[in-house]
Image (tube, helix red, strand yellow):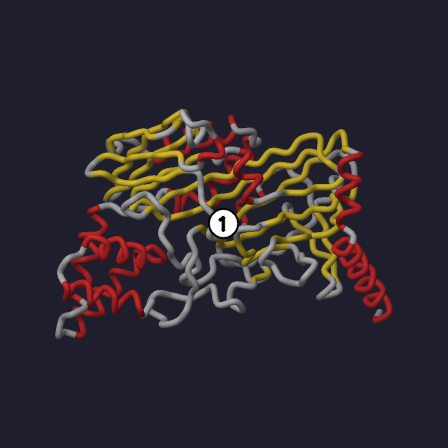
Amino acid sequence: MKSSLFILGTACYLALTLTLLDFDVAERAQAQSAQDDLVVHEWGTFTSIAGKNGVALDWRPLNGASDLPKFVYTSADKKGWRGSYNDPGKGRVAKVRMETPVIYFYTAKEMEVDVKVAFPGGTITEWYPQAGWANARFESGINWGKIKLLPSETPQFLREVAYSHYYPARETDAVPVQVCNPDKTKIEKEKFLFYRGVGDFELPLKVKLNGEKIVLNTTEEKYGSKSNPGGNITSLIVFENHGGKIGYEFVPTISGETTLERPNLNKNLTQVFDELEKILVTQGLYEKEAKAMIETWKDSWFEEGLRVFYVLPRKRADEILPLTVAPRPQETVRVLVGRTEVITPEMERDVRKQVGFLRSNSKEVREKAQSYLKKYGRFYEPILKSILEGERDAKVRAQIEKIIALS
């Protein structure tokens, strides 16, 4: 038994190690050979928070407890990314949270493929199945090495009792993947390749609130011309949930600067789900993939607040996350959605009021205010920073700066 485990572990280790050391061979082979029936699809989200000038704020994307199963690998705690706003000194700042990219594979025959994703502007913080990188760090991206695609198998995937955002992504027709895990000398199987990360790269859309108007602006000159500096961004949804009342506005495309009114709160979530699913399918996802993406994020995408969703131009998505699959698939679809949170005046007033209660002489009042503020979770500190931008009262500024310092 021990010898069998040793042989398995050694085989897995050698397979992944050789792939890491000689991935350039696979890349050369990729240019020469394409699998006629191999299809690769990917979806994911880039979450950012808009400051008053539209530029993304620094925030702590991993504040609070993880929403992932315990079998998912993580570097977040080891590298000091995770923390909570009332736990001083915990949680590092970033501009963008890369949330739940999953890579699906479709093929009629069993095959082996090499898969890696570079991430030059960020750090990989969570992933599954096991993966590595040539320098044993995840700052530059993630490499699963050689994986096996198993179209004829229906394995029992790991699952914990507690609900997680992780599981709905399995509800597709993608084939299972098998990855050797050299650290645990075992084989891991899953319905997809999963990873998350954080970064400080620029997203292609600026969003700001000007009174009751939302100003959208494409940002990067290299994607357009002098007369069209940011190029086009397609399939935007401006969404608002205020006190349980829902509104959204679909914008087919924008170029340069576009100004919109805040949405009328006369819609329902079913209408939003249908609109978003239509967008995702139009962008190339299969219907089950689109439904899985919405199911994964429906409890946070559509919670209280004002936010803008949009599909990143494919060119920009490939620059942020260069994906390499060898042999080359006949089709690769990548639908990466930008999610920009907008801090509204109502949110600022609400937080400002609770900050005032934190100065109360009553312990009960202070604790109640602290508990109330927790509903803003990881967006709590960015709201404070937004308030600070326009605050002129020295005493209030000092109070807010003290709270931020403890974040």
- Of 252 and 277, nearer the camera is 252
Q: Residue at x 71, y 30 (%)?
A: 330
Q: Quadrant of the C terminus?
A: bottom left
Compared to residue 169, the image places residue 74 above or below, namely below
Q: Quadrant of residue 245?
A: top left
The image position of residue 336, as x and y in percent, is: 51, 39
Instruction: Say which quarter of the image contains residue 42.
Output: top right
- Name which residue lies at 34% across and 58% down: 377
Residue 189 vs residue 301: left or right? right
Residue 28 to residue 251: above or below: below
Task: Tell me where residue 275 sits by quadrant.
Answer: top left
Residue drawn where x is 34% and y is 65% of the image: 85
Name the foreground residue: 240 vs 58.
58
Residue at x-position 33% and y-position 55%: 379
Question: Whole-percent x and y of residue 271?
Answer: 37, 30
Image quarter where the N terminus lies is: bottom right
**Secondary structure state at the residue bearing disc 1:** strand
The crowd level at tag 1 (other Cα within 10 Å; few <14, some 14-19, many 20+) is many
Q: Position of residue 182 (x, y in %)?
A: 74, 63
Left or right of residue 80, residue 189 in this image: right
Which amino acid, by three-letter code, is at mark 1?
Met
| Side of 145 relative to 285 (left or right) | right
Q: Nearer the viewer, residue 19 or 154?
A: 19
Total tally of numbered discs in the picture = 1
Residue placed under numbered mark 1 in the picture: 98
